[in-house]
Amino acid sequence: MLLREIERELEKWDIWRDPFRELNRMNLELFGRFRPDSSEFPPVNMWRNEEKVVISTELPGIDPAGVDLNMTGKTLTIKFQRKPEELKEGEVYTRKERWYGEFSRTIELPFSIDLDRVEAKYRKGVLHIELQRAEDEKPRKITVSSE
């Protein structure tokens, strides 16, 4: 009888059946309140070929006019600000996991860029930046002559 009562009490505390789920919940609760490291946010995908490099990042809810892109040498910096939603009178958060504030991400590029041929497009919350390789950085074939 005592064993059944203990089992019923443990069922209320779901942590005993799946401690990893509870650990994950606690981590989210604890660390979800902090801002992400600026060197890692926003997350980006980057791919390249011999002609260009393309960078893609998700910026949902961001006004594209407020995104600042700067190039210095082979370094691209993406800066933006996410403002918190304003609550109406009497409303309170019951969960707050989205970060807000000023963010900056610096990305080292694999080669120099032709700044006159940079294209940045924002569609459905995703920013795509296409950066063309500078002409003087492109590989050139050298012909070997014989005498």
Image (cartoon, rainbow, N blue to C red):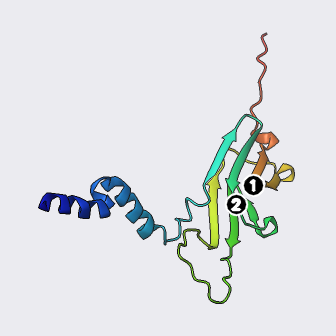
* Residue closest to the eye, 90 or 25: 90
Q: Please state if 17 lies on the left or on the right of 78 as rendered.
A: left
Labels in figure, total: 2
Outermost residue, front side: 1
Whether 53 is drawn above or below 5: the answer is above
Label 2 with label 1: CB-CB less than 8 Å? yes
* Residue closest to the eye, 135 or 125: 125
Q: CA distance from mark 2 to mark 1?
A: 7 Å
Tell me the amino acid under the disc marked 1.
Leu
Q: Which residue has dot 2 on it?
A: 59
* Residue closest to the eye, 24 or 111: 24
Q: Residues within 10 Å of mark 1 (few under 14, many from 20)?
A: some
| Image coords of residue 80 (percent x, y) | 70, 68
Q: Secondary structure at mark 1?
A: strand
Q: Secondary structure at mark 2?
A: loop
Q: Which residue has dot 1 on it?
A: 127
| Image coords of residue 29 (percent x, y) | 43, 68
**Residue 67 occupies which quadrant of the picture?**
bottom right
What residue is shown at x 66% (from left), y 48% (from top)? Answer: 109
Tell me the amino acid under the disc marked 2.
Leu
| Image coords of residue 132 (percent x, y) | 80, 44
Outermost residue, top side: 147
* Residue closest to the eye, 11 or 137: 11
Q: Please state if 76 lies on the left or on the right of 115 as rendered.
A: left
Q: Please state if 145 lies on the left or on the right of 46 as rendered.
A: right
What residue is shown at x 55% (from left), y 72% (from top)? Answer: 96
| Image coords of residue 61 (percent x, y) | 72, 66
